[in-house]
Amino acid sequence: MSSELEKLIELQKTDTNIRKLKQAIESAEQRRASIEQEFEQHASSIREIQAKRDAAQAGRAGLEKQIAENKTYLERADRNLKGSQNQKEYETAMRETDALQKQISALETQVLEKMTEIEEVEKILTERADEVNSLEADRAKSLKNFDKELAANRKEFEAKTAERHEIFVTLPAQKAAVYNRLAQRSRDGIAVAEVVGGSCSACFMKLRPQMQVEMKTSDRIITCESCTRILYLAPAESKAVIQES
C-alpha cells in the first residue's frame, strides 16, 4: 500500500469521525429536549395523581363544611321543633329536621367515598414514592452526563479537525482535490472505501478479480468502476486475495 493511499485512508477515517461528531453536536439541543421531555412525562403523570389527591381532599373538606353547616341548621330545627306552639309549626320544624338529616346522611356518604378515593391515590403515591423522590435527581444526573458527553464531543471535534488539517496538507494537491471532490459529491462523505468480500463497501459493486489482485500488487491508486471512490484492501482482505490468486 502506498503512503499516499495510507494518508487518504487515515483522512477518510478522520473525516468520518468528524462527521459523526458534528452531527452529535448539531443535534445536541434536540437530544437534550428529548431527555427533558422524557422526565417531564414521568413528572406529569405523578403530578396528575397528586392533583387527583388534592382535589379529593378539597372535595372532602367542602363536604365536611356543608355537614357542619347543616348540623347547625339541624340544631336550630330541633329547637324550633321543641318550641313549636301549634301543629303547623310542629310539622314545619319536623319537615326541616327530616330534610337536614337526609342531607347530612348523604353528605357523610360522599365523605366516605372521598376518603376511599384519597386512600387509593395515596396508595399509588406510596408505591411510587421512590420514583417521586429520585425523579429530579435522576433528571439532573442524566443532563449532567449529557453535558459531559457533549463537552467531550466538542473537544474531540476540535482535535480531529486539527488532525485532519495535518493529514490533508501532506497530500499532493491533485490527490487532495480528488478526495474533496469525491467526499463533497457523496451524501455520506465517503471518498475512500474499503473492499469487503470482494465488493466496494460504499456502493456494494463486485470488483473484478484482476482488479483485486492489482490492488495488492500495485502502488497505483485504484478507484471503483461503479462509484469512482478510491478503494483499499484491509490487511485481512489483502491476504485473502493473495491466497485466492
Image: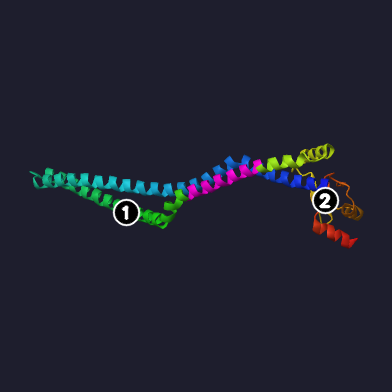
Q: Residue at x 43, y 49 (%)?
A: 46
Which of the marked residues, 2 or 1, is nearer the chain's N terminus? 1
Q: Disc 2 on helix, strand or loop?
A: strand
- Depth check: 124 or 16 in front? 16
Give the magenta-colored segment's residue range. Answer: 138-158
Eye-nearest disc, 2 or 1: 2
**Figure quadrant of residue 238:** bottom right
Q: Disc 1 on helix, strand or loop?
A: helix
Label for residue 63? none
- Depth check: 180 or 81 in front? 180
**Circle 2: is it few (<14), some (14-19), or many (20+) Cα within 10 Å?**
many
- Residue 140 magenta: yes
Q: Which residue is mark 1?
A: 115
**Figure quadrant of residue 154:** top right
Q: Which amino acid, mark 2? A: Tyr
Q: Which amino acid, mark 1? A: Met
- Depth check: 173 or 78 in front? 173
Label for residue 232? 2
Q: Residue at x 17, y 45 (%)?
A: 72
Which x, y percent locates residue 195?
A: 82, 53
